Amino acid sequence: MVIDSVLRAPAFTVTSAAPNDEWRKSLANDSVGVIGLGLMGEVFSRRLIDGGQSVVGYDIDAAKGVRLADMGARAAASIAEVARVCDPIVLAVFDTSQVEDVVENHMLPAVGETSRKIVLCASTCDPDRIASLGERVIPRGIRFLETPVSGTSEQVRRGEGVGLIGGDRDTAAEAEAVLAIIFPRRFHVGHVGDGGRTKLAVNLILGLNRMALAEGLVFATRLGLDPAAFLPVAKQSAAYSQIMDVKGAKMLNGLLNGDFTPEGRVRQTLKDVHLMLEQAKRHGQTLPMLDVHCDVLEACARAGEADLDNSAVINEIARRHKPTP
């Protein structure tokens, strides 16, 4: 049967414990590293600082290092410096190629084969390439865990993000103090690579829900309804999804005021959608609704909206309007 591989997959396990004093003491002599201080990396840093951890971070953009210092952490001069002084180290860079470059060209030369440092890769990546990376670096001094998160940067800031942990369970247990601070809710979903596979499947559903909400709001408006009055009705209806809470008001505010301050950028979502389509092609799967989502995101990017919040898909839905003859 087609679903045999799914039925044979290891069961997910969920953890929702908060960090306790014993876990905090286990990291008392170490700083936690954060490499990549964009939307998510900055939020991870803030949660770690608020959780009592010493943080050392690095980003190629020096201004982000200044913001980190203002938060009470230390900005490193290089990735190698973070690799030498921190354990564990959280990666929050943009894509798979950047993860590979950071780990293999900057971290490995800095730590040595006996370091056994833990790397928590929170970036959404090509799961096959990340699985291969994990196999390559573990014998060379780095214990690699995949830790992408489901949720916007604002949800993660509030402690509502869901961590998707792929990799060795014992290594995950050693990193529990950090994982518990960043992801109060988390699942161990399997091996390195399975975190990304889970994240892509979740994000496929999430993105289509976002598209459906945008289309519904535009449709209600075209019918002459007040979208601000329609949204609370939709939330109480059988059509409800969490995306209405997370993105509904943001979409309406964006339409009215042009404010799409990012919590998850169009270009990041488009990168993930391309990964989904590549994975689907490898497995012989067609994803017709995702093809439409990709087309809308690419149109947003062409319209100069790549760095806006991904709720800006409502702009493109509204643009696809043919006046009544």
Image (cartoon, grey):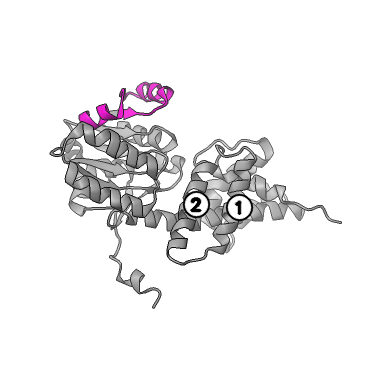
User: What range is drawn magenta here?
Assistant: 57-85
Furthest-right residue in view? 325
Quarter where residue 24 is shown: top left
The disc placed on residue 274 is 2
Residue 310, position as x, y percentages in the image: 55, 44
Q: Is residue 97 left or right of residue 113?
A: right
What residue do we see at 35% from left, 41% from top?
A: 99
Q: Secondary structure at mark 2?
A: helix
Question: Is 155 included in the stretch rendered in magenta?
Answer: no
Of mark 2 and mark 1, the one earlier in the sequence is: 2
Mark 2: few/some/many CA within 10 Å (<14, 14-19, 20+): some
For the point 43% across and 34% down, which residue is it? 38
58 inside magenta stretch: yes
- Percent coordinates x, y for residue 159 in the rendering: 38, 43
Which is more toward the observer, 243 or 130? 130
Residue 144 appears in the rendering? yes
Q: Amino acid at mark 2?
A: His
Residue at 62%, 37% in the rendered image: 304
Judged from the image, the secondary structure of the residue bearing numbered disc 1 is helix
> Which label number is shown at residue 295?
1
Q: Amino acid at mark 1?
A: Asp
Q: The N terminus is located in which quarter?
A: bottom left
